[in-house]
Image (cartoon, helix red, strand yellow):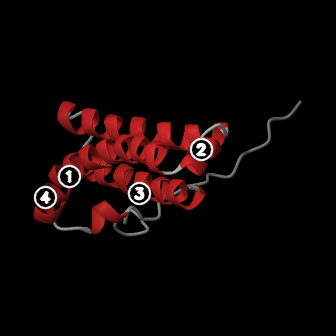
Amino acid sequence: MRAQAQPAVKMQRVSSGEFTCPLTAYCLPAEIVDRAANGLGWISLICAVTAVALTLIEHVFQPEFAAAWTHPVLRLASLGVFLMSIALIVLQRAGCLSKRRLIDLGMSFSGGDRLRVRSV
């Protein structure tokens, strides 16, 4: 058998320019990122306390809420908000994530919290 000659192919890497990340926190100045990451811990604490307090208050003052509380989706939504708040506090205190990544995670939590409020 004859060996066929392969044409020499040269591949060049094409640069598409500077990488721009679509995540919001990567577009913010460093000073704002620092303040936002520090404030996220406080907001998470307020959200965790409020989730528990409002649930207890609604049980006492709204009997119809106590009846609706038997539905598992409502329980899961409230538990999810509480646990996500605690998780954000732990992540912020531990320093496991960068401040920019923490802000993006907090923004996704904000969207999930809005869904919980609409379900109640």
Q: Left or right: where does residue 24 sit relative to residue 62?
A: left
Q: Which residue is mark 3?
A: 110
Decide: marks 2, 1 in contact (CB < 8 A)? no
Q: Amino acid at mark 1?
A: Ala
Q: CA distance from mark 4 to mark 2?
A: 33 Å
Per the image, label 1 sits on a secondary structure element best described as helix
Q: Which residue is mark 2?
A: 74
Q: Who's the residue at 32% across and 35% down the image?
A: 86
- What is the x, y in percent for residue 50? 33, 48
How far across and how far down the image is residue 100, in percent? 26, 53
Task: Kindly report which numbered mark, 2 or 1, lies closer to the viewer in this rendering.
Answer: 2
Specify which label sits upstream in the sequence, 3 or 4.
4
Name the amino acid, label 4.
Arg
The residues bearing labels 3 and 4 have C-alpha atoms spaced at a distance of 17 Å
Q: Position of residue 53 (x, y in %)?
A: 34, 43
Earlier-in-chain disc, 3 versus 1 = 1
| Mark 2 to mark 3 CA distance (whole Å) | 17 Å
Upstream in the sequence, badge 2 or badge 1? 1
Residue 35, numbered label: 4
Check contact, mark 3 vs mark 1: CB within 8 A. Answer: no
Residue 9 or residue 96, whichever sits in front: 96
**Circle 3 crowding by C-alpha within 10 Å: few under 14, some 14–19, many from 20:** some
